[in-house]
Image: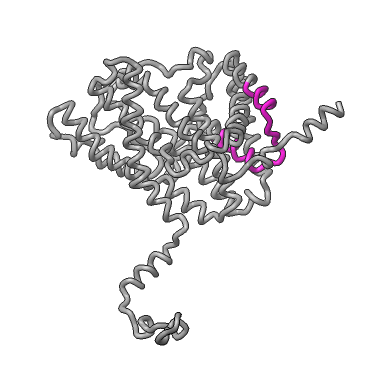
Amino acid sequence: MHASTGFWRRMPTLGDRWSPTENSFGLMRQVMACVVILAHCWPIGFAEGNPGDSWTSGQTDIGFFALFGLISCSGYLNADSGVRITAKSFAKRRFLRIFPGWWASLIVTALVIAPLVALYENGTLRGFWTHPDGPFSYITTNVGASMAQFPISGLLAHVPYARMVGGPSAFAGSLWTLHYEFGCYVVIGVLIATGWLRRSPRIVLWLTLAAFAVVLVDLLRADSWTIRPVPHGAIGPYPIIGSLAFNWTVYFGWLFLLGATARLYMHRIPMHGAVAAVVAVVLALSAWRGGYLVIGPPAYTYLMVYVAVALPPRLHRYARKRDYSFGIYIYGFAVQQVLALVGGARYGIVAYIALSFAGTLVLAAASWHFVERPALRLKNVSLRQVLRSRLDRRSPPTDADSAVPPATVALPNETP
């Protein structure tokens, strides 16, 4: 007993192994974003369900599995950022990370991709621009984070995915989760502004336990332990993020808070391969036999954080200079819909997967290099600095500006 207790105490913690600049979260985010693209190949290209649903008795599939990992990682990273910067800086960084790329994707989708789809389907743009759910409505309706309009001008009504939804289908169907993610940012922002995130991390722990209680009650009331989040109606609408389904608000919020809790209590969480192996077995058993709804998220969060600090150092720098994860998220669905429209699925699932990744990565790379990265360069630049710089450039130089300081004046045969 004493020996095992001593081993447990000597075990390194997450706090011992964590470094904000040396971790593999960037790699993991891109991998999980690609897994979402992979999962969507079946419903978008072939009108079939995401793989994994039957393996887990309907509890989850590989698409949701990747999505849950992205949200959990986001909770950890946003909490890590929140304990080091001000609320104003946090809000600015979140805005620059999300909205420039998001707005660019709305414009590209509505004014470039959708017109090409209209020409392909109808041979004309007649009625395209004036449709009640037309491209301009798509942009203005979705300019916040609510993503309230998915189709554009009645297009994509005959692709495989349309057979599943029964009519004109989405250009960016995967973005239904955006307003949940943004809502989580708002919660963290409030905790930073009030100082509670640094001074009272127990508040995050209590919020996490409250969300867990709702999920646990749902599982205990269910006829089977192999269930998905139980619907409870909608909440809202709220400014910017619109209306939210209560069950997904709780479930996604729980995943986000689990990641945040792991960061805030990092010095109490053991990080060891033996623990990770046991947690992986528990996660697999819950997905296979039942109880994944309550067991899966905390187990999954632990494994995500463990992998982030345990992968070889050479992988830590991956995606730091080229983070295509958000671009993959915002463009993947549209690329896959267009491929299905032009018959890309006729070559089989392997070819369709390859084409999906190729097309998505082209747009994701363009988004990162031309929109997202330039926007992020402004995160440490204040509006006052920008205005002052512009005023300085416009102001004519004075005699004092053009004079050489006496200390730098060099006399003949002297060095300055």
Pick the residue in front: 245 or 253.
Answer: 253
Question: Is 403 included in the stretch rendered in magenta?
Answer: no
Which segment is the magenta one? 253-280
- Assign the N terminus to one quadrant of the image: top right
- Assign the C terminus to one quadrant of the image: bottom left
Q: Is residue 217 visible?
A: no
Q: Residue 222 location, x and y as percent?
A: 59, 17
Q: Is residue 268 visible?
A: yes
Pick the residue in front: 384 or 239.
Answer: 384
Q: Is residue 368 left or right of residue 120?
A: right
> Within the image, what quadrant is residue 302 found in?
top right
Q: Is residue 52 left or right of residue 163?
A: right
Residue at 53 percent of width and 24 percent of height: 229
Q: How would you classify the magenta stretch by its main secondary structure? A: helix
Q: Residue 236 location, x and y as percent?
A: 46, 39
Which residue extends farthest right? 2
Residue at 40 percent of width and 48 percent of height: 373
Q: Residue 307 location, x and y as percent?
A: 58, 32
Question: Is 266 included in the stretch rendered in magenta?
Answer: yes
Q: Residue 189 location, x and y as percent?
A: 54, 49
Which residue extends farthest front? 413
Q: Is residue 223 above or below residue 198?
A: above
Pick the residue in front: 282 or 348.
Answer: 348
Residue at 32 percent of width and 21 percent of height: 352
Residue at 44 percent of width and 17 percent of height: 51
Q: Is residue 175 above or below residue 157?
A: below
Q: Is residue 97 above or below residue 173?
A: below
> Within the image, what quadrant is residue 116 found in?
top left
